[in-house]
Image (tube, helix red, strand yellow):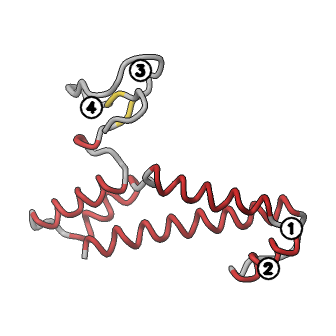
Amino acid sequence: EHGGGNRCQTEKCNKGAQGKNENKVFACTEHGGGVKTTLIKRLNEASAAGASTKRSIDEVEGDVEEAPAAKKAVVEETVGFEKLRVAELRAECTKRGLDTKGVKAALVKKLRDWVEEEEEEEAMERARSLGS
């Protein structure tokens, strides 16, 4: 719930492991942490309480973070770009409507940035659809 040795920053919460990382602080899921599942839970609670969906989404929109599994999927996908040849990278850029000019490192960066933007847009769209 509190993850790898982190401690909740909420004053009276004693959750979180102690040890080498005990100085790291964040909000635990019980106190408004920013992971997607918590965001969804907060939106559902606000909706059930009769709160304005638009307002609820606006209030928590900045809190959206990708869950560790989603981050891992993005990392695995973008690591694959390193293994492609320049011609293959250009083909991937063309598929995504990206500029195909540049050296391998530049093409990989364009593709990684595109994947990250798509993931963020999908997360925001899911959050909006849950609030509707």
Between label 4 and label 2, give the one nearer the viewer. Answer: 2
Mark 3 residue crowding within 10 angstroms, few (<14) / some (14–19) / many (20+): some
Report how far apart the C-alphas of labels 4 and 2 lie in the structure: 48 Å
The percent coordinates of residue 19 (x first, y second) are 42, 17
Between label 4 and label 1, give the one nearer the viewer. Answer: 1
Instruction: Name the foreground residue: 87 vs 58.
Output: 87
Mark 4 residue crowding within 10 angstroms, few (<14) / some (14–19) / many (20+): some
Report how far apart the C-alphas of labels 4 and 3 lie in the structure: 14 Å
Residue, disc 1: 85
Report how far apart the C-alphas of labels 3 and 2 lie in the structure: 46 Å
Check the image and report above or below for 1 versus 91.
above
What secondary structure is found at the residue carrying circle 2? helix
Which image quarter: residue 88? bottom right
User: Counting residues from the N terminus, which is met first, the one under dot 3 or under dot 2?
Assistant: 3
Which label sits on residue 91?
2
What secondary structure is found at the residue carrying circle 1? loop
The percent coordinates of residue 32 (x first, y second) are 27, 45
Q: Amino acid at mark 3?
A: Glu
Residue, disc 3: 22
User: Counting residues from the N terminus, which is met first, the one under dot 4 or under dot 2?
Assistant: 4
Check the image and report above or below for 25 versus 46.
above
Residue, disc 4: 10
Report how far apart the C-alphas of labels 4 and 1 lie in the structure: 49 Å
What secondary structure is found at the residue carrying circle 3? loop
Q: Amino acid at mark 1?
A: Arg
Is disc 4 in contact with disc 2, using a CB cutoff of under 8 Å?
no
What secondary structure is found at the residue carrying circle 4? loop
Between label 4 and label 3, give the one nearer the viewer. Answer: 3
Q: Quadrant of the C terminus?
A: bottom left
Q: Amino acid at mark 4?
A: Thr
Q: Quadrant of the N terminus?
A: top left
In the figure, is residue 56 to the left or right of 88? left
